[in-house]
Amino acid sequence: MFATKRNRQRQKNCAMTKIIRILAIFWLTSLTAARAEPIALICGGVTHHYKPEKMDGTVNPASAIIDLDNKFIETPVGDFAISKITPATIWFSRPSSESPNEGSIDRGTGMLKISWYSKEDAAKKAKGLPFFVELYVELLCTPTKRMF
């Protein structure tokens, strides 16, 4: 009789342990599945045009938004699809456009860099051949802050 009481207690403890584990898994899953808010930034910097002739310009500070959930980034110089996210860098591109481009933003420094190519130079780049950049943009982005 004493042994069966002990066995019943062990079974109850085992059942409780399973329930606690299941609840913990649901809780952890809900934390990782949470949707991230889009990140609002202010970005400004310089442009370097190389075609038809070399010319430098300025990009006045303007808003940018990074939406990690929808894999989309809006910048002062265009909108792009996010292609890769690492702890240090977010990579984005618009390869099918008339002028293919690609870029990245450093998650630590906020440095955003974008290069545009002609379709011919994009094909050369993909093959590992020498290529030419038509336009290069370098922006420094900082998070927006509430005024009050």
Image (tube, rainbow, N blue to C red):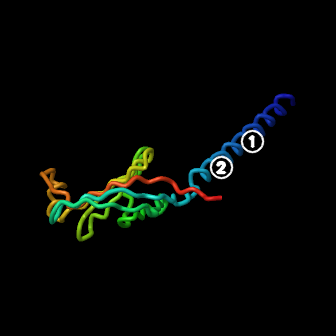
- Tell me where residue 95 appears, x and y as whole percent: 27, 64
The residue under label 2 is 27
Q: How crowded is mark 2: few (under 14 residues within 10 Å), some or many (20 or more)?
A: few
The residue under label 1 is 16
Of all residues, the one furthest to the top in this rendering is 2
Q: What residue type is labelled 1?
A: Met
In this rendering, position of residue 31 left or right of residue 100: right
Question: Mark 1 falls on what kind of element?
Answer: helix
In this rendering, position of residue 27 left or right of residue 16: left
In this rendering, position of residue 13 left or right of residue 40: right
Q: Which of 118 and 69 is in front in this view?
A: 118
How far is disc 2 from disc 1 in space, using C-alphas?
Answer: 16 Å
Q: What residue type is labelled 2?
A: Trp
Which image quarter: residue 82?
Answer: bottom left
Which image quarter: residue 115?
Answer: bottom left
Q: Residues within 10 Å of mark 1 (few under 14, many from 20)?
A: few
Quadrant holding the N terminus: top right
Quadrant holding the C terminus: bottom right
Q: Nearer the viewer, mark 2 or mark 1?
A: 2
Of all residues, the one furthest to the left in this rendering is 129
Circle nearer the N terminus (2, 1): 1
What is the number of callouts on the image? 2
Instruction: Please name the residue shown 32% across and 57% down the image.
Output: 46
